[in-house]
Amino acid sequence: MIRYTVGRLVSLCLSLIVASMVIFTVVEVVPGDPAAYMLGVNARPDTVAALRAELGLDVPKIERYLDWTAGMLQGDFGRSYTYRTPVSQMILDRMVVSLPLALLALALTVIIAFPAGIYAASRRGKLGDAGVMGATQLGVAVPNFWFAMILVLVFAVHLRWVSAGGFPGWGNGIWPGIKALILPAVALALPQAAILARVMRSSLLDMLGEDFIRTARAKGLSRRQALWRHAIRNALIPVLTIIGLQFSFLLAGGIVIEQIFYLPGLGRLIFQAISARDLIVVESVVMLLVGLVIIVNFAVDLAYALVDPRLRIRA
Amino acid sequence: MKRLTTLMLAGSTALFAGAAYAQHTHVNVAMQLEPPNLDPTAGAAQAIDSVVYSNIYEGLTRFMSDGSVVPGLAESWDISEDGLTYTFHLRDGVTFHDGTTMDAEDVKFTLDRARAEDSTNAQKALFANIAEVTVIDPLTVQITLSAPTGALLFNLAWGDAVIVAPESIGDAATHPIGTGAFVFEDWVQGDHINIARNPNYWGTPAVLDSATFRFISDPTAAFAALMAEDVDVFVGYPAPENIPQFEADPRFQVLVGNTEGETILAMNNAREPFDNPLVRQAVAHAIDRQAVIDGAMYGLGTPIGTHFAPHNPDYVDLTGLSNYDPERSRALLAEAGLPDGFTTTLNLPPPSYARRGGEIIAAQLRAVGIQTEINNQEWAQWLETTFRGRDFGLTIVSHTEPMDINIYANPEYYFQYNNPDFQALMTTLNETTDPARRTELLQQAQTIIAEDYVNAYLFELAVPTIARAGIEGLWLNQPTAAIDLTAVSWP
């Protein structure tokens, strides 16, 4: 287990270093200068040059890369070109929206997908199975931004149960914050739940065909008992992989949903930063998201080992 | 039971009245883009001015909604005979929001900072003719010019020329401190900005207690936010196709005002074949302006025939010079030696006037034999390649700065129009302070660029504002980007 963990850790660090190089190169190659963007069409060239100097953009790229990575190791992501505030503070401010949103959406995904997948597997080929499969097919097919708009029209414009968007902050208590995140979380969760339910079902069905289930049935367990006691735990490996991927997606993939609900999250930050060529913000946020994906995958790898003892020994 | 119902009714009425009362002193304003920072003297983003102009910061002079320039922090001024010295008399008793006094030293600081060597003022050219700023006494400041500048009072009304204090300018990007009728409260980046009434304002105090600015860029979200009554006012509403629906809804009022945005199909005058005036004229005649306005802007916008705002009293209607006439256009192309037309690039920045308008214009050009390769560009990319790099054949952009016909005097400007006569005319205009003579010169200037077909002038951009019925005091027009809330009130 220790060797396995160390091996995973080394690959984690390498991935992070490579990712930082790729991100920096890609972002810097895109045409567009933050100083020119900020000063607009009437600015004189000497004004743009003065602003570039003020922002530290006249420093060679290699030096900027080294400064950036060295700063990140100490938790300092630098200073935003356009907002003129520390990037780490901006990320923290946005995290308190994006992280709860992703967690809420993930919880909803699991709460919907597990029962649906297990139910469909236990009713294989019957009406219940067909019903769940039909619903998930629809869930996968419906784009989440469209679904989000429908939710807004029904619950905000028509019924007026919640506001159409925006985020009141956590300062006024937990409930107003949660309330503002419910619709976006549902919009994010539904397509993910549909995917996860299908994975859960097929993984369970694979397990139900295995020898050890036949043995379990032979020793006298009912189909249902065999499913709950033996099949589910074994079926969890592919499901965990998907959940790991989904969490990263929910955190990073809120860009469109955050636009629709005008939530001040990471997705909106990165969207604004890209159009303003706030390079350091784009680089840092993307790096953070990549880092999170890599760390989540690392955690999923460790979770495999917990669920499946064979992985511990093999490594 | 009946008693109980009555009580409940009374209670709910009281509650309702309470809610209505609370609403009457606060307004939720939405706009599409969030300002990157809140210092109008160090950035070109219109969103900065939308929030701070007149609300938080004031200049020596200021714009009114109709575009006129009136006294701001300067109560009055005297102009010397030669037009080179302006003496401004400042208002007495004006304080910044941090309690410090606004005096001649602050004016000198502001103007010296804007025109300094290392200035990052996006409109530094506005201050180019200022030779010296002298403090006479705390309430009198003298500006000496290197050459007569007829537009000085106008220039000083821009958001880029608002008066700031040396004590507070360091934090202006995130915590603006001005002299306006509203005090900055807080900014949750990505979400909202709060401002509150300034109790110590020197002039007529604001009617509202407070206001919140929100930023909603998605058109569907903008629609939902208004319909759900989450926002009371949306300035620059991004989905003109929904306007009839708001007009029909008694909860709302729709204001369609004009802006200083001359939307043009710019041509690269230095590049073949647009270096030939006949080709440029052919392009101008190939475009059906009304079809572009109807198709891309849902009818919002006024056709123009030159680079000048139609609502300006000095405007000359020259649309006749570039009327829609595809036959004429084909004939002109043949005369220019291009009977089979040609192929060029059409670079389109993100706004819908460019993207939607661009497709319509591409089709109209194709009809006379001009093929276009459309490149959709982001703003930053457009600024770098099209604007600074001048790597384009055609591009569509709205020039939103007020009175910017002088850009045609700069041969380095991206469309690269080089006409010494026009440049001389602009120099004369700068030196002229007599209003009648200025009108004459401005009209000559409009005619020269229209007859030279420098660009194909499309339409003056309109700005739709959607507000809850009964809200009064909003600006109808946008002579400069501003959401001036100082006179706004609920019924």
Image (cartoon, coloured by chain):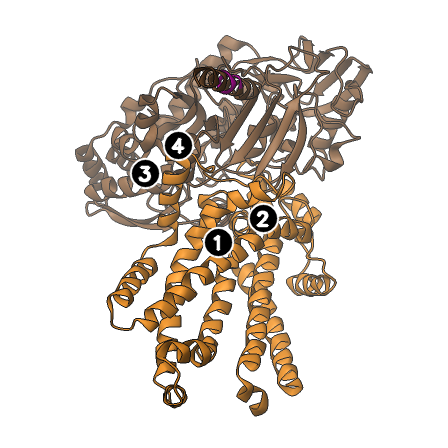
Chain colours: A orange, B brown
Q: Amino acid at mark 3?
A: Gly
Can you give x and y, in whole percent of width and height, for residue B330 in the image?
Answer: 19, 38
Which of the labelled discs sits on residue B263, or is there none?
4
Q: Position of residue B241 (x, y in %)?
A: 31, 33
Mark 1 vs mark 2, CA separation in Å:
25 Å
* Residue at x 65% of width, y 24% of height: B196
Q: Residue at x 48, y 78 (%)?
A: A233
Segment tinted magenta in the rendering: B10-14
Q: Which mark is residue B357?
A: 3
Find disc 1 in the rendering and name its residue. Answer: A254
Element assignment for label 3: helix
Three-letter amino acid code at the position of disc 2 = Pro
Image disc number at residue A34 = 2
Amino acid type for the residue under numbered disc 1: Gly
Q: CA distance from mark 3 to mark 2?
A: 27 Å
Secondary element type, mark 1: loop
* Quadrant of res B142: top right
Q: Residues within 10 Å of mark 3 (few under 14, many from 20)?
A: many
Q: Classify residue B138 as left or right of residue B254.
A: right
Pointers 3 and 4 in contact (CB under 8 A)?
yes
Is B12 contained in the magenta span? yes
Name the magenta segment's main secondary structure. helix
Label 4: chain letter: B
